[in-house]
Image (cartoon, helix red, strand yellow):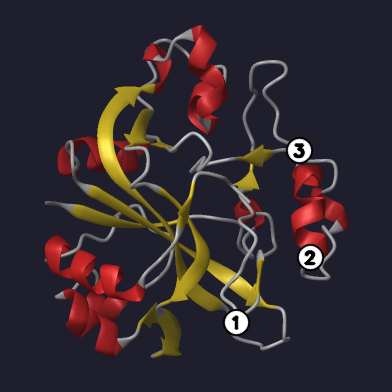
């Protein structure tokens, strides 16, 4: 069993929306906020940030002004159990993942109690069902992933991973995994040991062209099962 650890969700970079979704550290409940869409999509398939207002209101958080007129690049789409990528990362998906392998998603979230440091936490999991090219998705199924919603040239090699129902989804409550050390956010040392290690130096948690791999995916899954996460097939 192979497994990849993939960072998702809005962040403080311009391409990430210059914002972080909120989390209540006491309960683990959070709002999944995707990065902005920067490419044309098929008409009617736009995903406005304003749909997040009810979920954000439960945390006493308002959508920032600079996102109120923008659309989301909703990827992963936990409602449809899909995750897409392009370029070098798409190549890694094809090279490393097969039926039954894992994609584990994490995000940097903003503590609603006002703590300065972000909460880096696992937010979802896919057990891989299959991988398809975005341009091979039927027109009737385009509205299932951010990459198939895009108007793409036929020679585009964007890859979409589809998760198995019932054992894939968003975590109802996130699972914190990170701390800040050596001038970066990293997976906690105790967790690196429990998981059997990652392919990135000292658990480095940042967006990168290289997706971190679990050295021992079954061992990670045994750890995850002990955490007892509840999966939902919904974005929020």
Q: Which residue is mark 2?
A: 58
Q: Does residue 94 lie above or below 59 as drawn?
A: above
Label for residue 39? none
Q: Which residue is mark 1?
A: 25
Residue 197 visible in the snapshot: yes
Q: Does residue 53 lie above or below 188 as drawn?
A: above
Q: Nearer the viewer, mark 3 or mark 1?
A: 1
Closer to the chain start, of discs 1 and 2, is 1
Q: Does residue 161 lie above or below 207 as drawn?
A: above
| Residue 86 picture quarter | top left
Who is closer to the viewer here, 40 or 56? 56
Closer to the chain start, of discs 3 and 1, is 1
Residue 81 locus on image (x, y percent): 44, 38
Residue in view at x 24 percent, y 69 percent: 200
Residue in view at x 18 percent, y 42 percent: 100
Residue 74 locus on image (x, y percent): 58, 40
Who is closer to the viewer here, 154 or 128? 128
Residue in view at x 66 percent, y 41 percent: 72
Q: Secondary structure at mark 1?
A: loop
Closer to the chain start, of discs 3 and 2, is 3
Q: Nearer the viewer, mark 3 or mark 2?
A: 2
Residue 91 locus on image (x, y percent): 25, 37
Residue 198 visible in the snapshot: no
Whole-Å distance between the Cαs marked 3 and 2? 19 Å
Whole-Å distance between the Cαs marked 3 and 1? 27 Å
| Residue 16 picture quarter | bottom right
Whole-Å distance between the Cαs marked 1 and 2? 14 Å
Mark 2 neighbour density, 10 Å: few (under 14) some (14–19) many (20 or more): few
Who is closer to the viewer here, 210 or 30? 30
| Residue 184 picture quarter | bottom left
């Amino acid at each position: 069993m192979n497994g990849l650890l993939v960072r998702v969700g809005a962040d403080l970079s311009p391409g990430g929306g210059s914002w972080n979704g909120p989390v209540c550290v006491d309960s683990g409940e959070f709002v999944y906020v995707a990065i902005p869409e920067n490419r044309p999509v098929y008409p009617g398939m736009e995903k406005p940030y304003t749909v997040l207002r009810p979920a954000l209101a439960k945390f006493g958080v308002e959508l920032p002004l600079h996102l109120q007129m923008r659309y989301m690049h909703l990827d992963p789409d936990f409602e449809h159990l899909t995750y897409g990528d392009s370029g070098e990362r798409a190549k890694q998906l094809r090279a490393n993942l097969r039926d039954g392998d894992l994609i584990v998603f994490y995000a940097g979230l903003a503590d609603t109690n006002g703590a300065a440091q972000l909460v880096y936490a696992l937010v979802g999991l896919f057990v891989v069902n299959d991988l398809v090219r975005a341009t091979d998705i039927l027109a009737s199924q385009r509205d299932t992933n951010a990459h198939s919603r895009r108007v793409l040239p036929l020679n585009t090699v964007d890859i979409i991973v589809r998760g198995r129902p019932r054992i894939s989804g968003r975590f109802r409550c996130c699972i914190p995994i990170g701390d800040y050390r050596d001038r970066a956010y990293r997976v906690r040392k105790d967790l690196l040991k429990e998981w059997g290690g990652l392919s990135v130096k000292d658990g480095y948690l940042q967006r990168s062209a290289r997706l971190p791999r679990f050295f021992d995916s079954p061992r990670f899954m045994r750890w995850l099962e002990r955490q007892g996460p509840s999966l939902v097939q919904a974005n929020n």
